[in-house]
Structures are given as structure tokens and as C-alpha cells.
Amino acid sequence: MDEFAHFKLKIDAKPTMFHGKTVRKNLTQSLWLKKIRPQILKENNYTCVICKHHPTEENYKELHVHEIEEYDFDNGVVKLIGLDLICANCHAFQHFKRSQLVLSTEQLDRLIIHFTKVNDCSIEEYKRYRKKLQSFAFEQNIERIISQQKSIRTKINHIRFAIMGDIPFKDLVIERLKQKDVYYEYS
Ligand SMILES: [Zn+2]
Ligand SMILES: [Zn+2]
């Protein structure tokens, strides 16, 4: 049994071969900021879906739209499953590898406090969770290296994107990805 199954906030890490590759980066600022983001804010009642943080209007920037992704290593595809509204603190755990690189020790300590509050757990439990993730990441890494080698053999040199979930302005997003020749369709 997974002793951490009840955690609301979990740590996620994007596989290396997909780093810097997101649907958002392929969209125009206006499509993302004027159409998609306001819709996601509204749908979620301006509240973080994980910790329920609900800032005042002048602090809406504390809420981020997070792309929920899955990865197809064999075809080099980022699958966009959906869009979540999460606060900056929770978001840092969705991109934990990156956060560790860019944040100071003090900032990281504050984030860990956020983690223990949201999950109602102790620092010790947090540490056990981190340890467990590391051993899991190790196993996954082996799988990943095998797939990456396969990708190299099949010459995957540009990452593409598939839209699997229902997202606002889905048609416009797909159209844009097609224009940029980075759209991948599963049949
Ligand atoms: Zn949050
Ligand atoms: Zn994100």
C-alpha cells in the first residue's frame, strides 16, 4: 500500500528529454493570457485546486495555470491531459527539480512547510516521501534511458504535442500547434 496516497500535494518531475517543451510555449501570449487563463481562473473559482488558497483580486498572479502532462517516450510526444489552477507554492512541487535549482535554501524551507501543512504531515514523513521518490525515480530512469535510446534510433529530433483532455479553446490550440508543425494526433 502507498502510505502517501492521501497526500494532496505531491512532487512531480518532468523527464529530461521533454524539458522546456510545453504546449503553452507554442501559443500566442494573447491566446494564453486573454483566453485560456481567464477561463481556467473562473472555472476554478480563483482558488488553488490543491490547497484551496484563494487570493484577493490584486494577487491573482499567485495563481498559476499548470499543464498536466503525460509522456510518450517512443514517439517523443507531450500529451496535455488538462489544465489545473494551482498556487505558486503548490506549483513549485509540480516542477520540483527546477525549483531546487532556482530557489534559495530559505525559499525551499518555506515550501517544505507549505507541503507539511497541505498534507497534514510531519517533516519526517516529508523526508521519507522524498526518499521513496528517489528510489522510484532511479527505476524510472532506467526505463527512460532505454526509451531515449530507442528514440534516438528512430530519429526523434523534434518533440510534438497531443491534446488529450478537454481544455478551453481546444480547437484554437490545435490549429496553432498544426501551424507550427508540432501537432501529434493519436488515432
Ligand atoms: Zn496551493
Ligand atoms: Zn506547471
Image: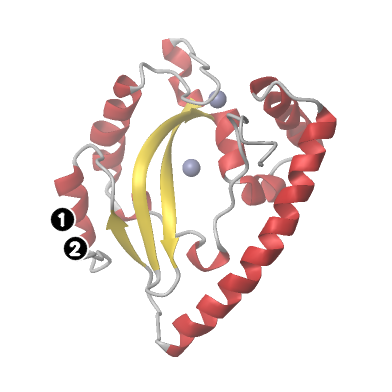
Residue at 25% over, 32% down? 34
Instruction: Determine the secondary structure under disc 2.
Output: helix
Residue at 46% over, 10% down? 56
| Label 1, residues with CA under 10 Å away: few <14, some 14-19, many ≥20 | few
Residue contact between numbered discs 1 and 2, judged by CB atoms under 8 Å: yes
In the rendered image, the quadrant that contains the C terminus is: bottom left
Q: Is residue 116 above or below residue 57?
A: below
On the rendered structure, is 25 left or right of 89? left
Q: Which mark is residue 178?
A: 2
Tell which quarter ligand 1 is in: top right
Instruction: Determine the secondary structure under disc 1.
Output: helix
Q: Is residue 174 above or below residue 31?
A: below
Q: Is mark 1 within 8 Å of ligand 2?
A: no
> Toward which corner of the image does residue 162 lie, by quadrant?
bottom left
Residue 31 location, x and y as percent? 24, 41
> Toward which corner of the image does residue 8 lie, by quadrant?
top right
Amino acid type, residue under disc 2 in the picture: Lys
Question: In front here: 101 or 133?
Answer: 133
The outermost residue toward the right is 124
Question: In front here: 130 or 27?
Answer: 130
Residue 3 location, x and y as percent? 70, 37
Residue at 59% over, 72% down? 143
CA distance for labels 1 and 2: 5 Å
Q: Identify residue for label 1.
A: 175
> Toward which corner of the image does residue 9 lie, by quadrant?
top right
Residue 11 location, x and y as percent? 63, 42
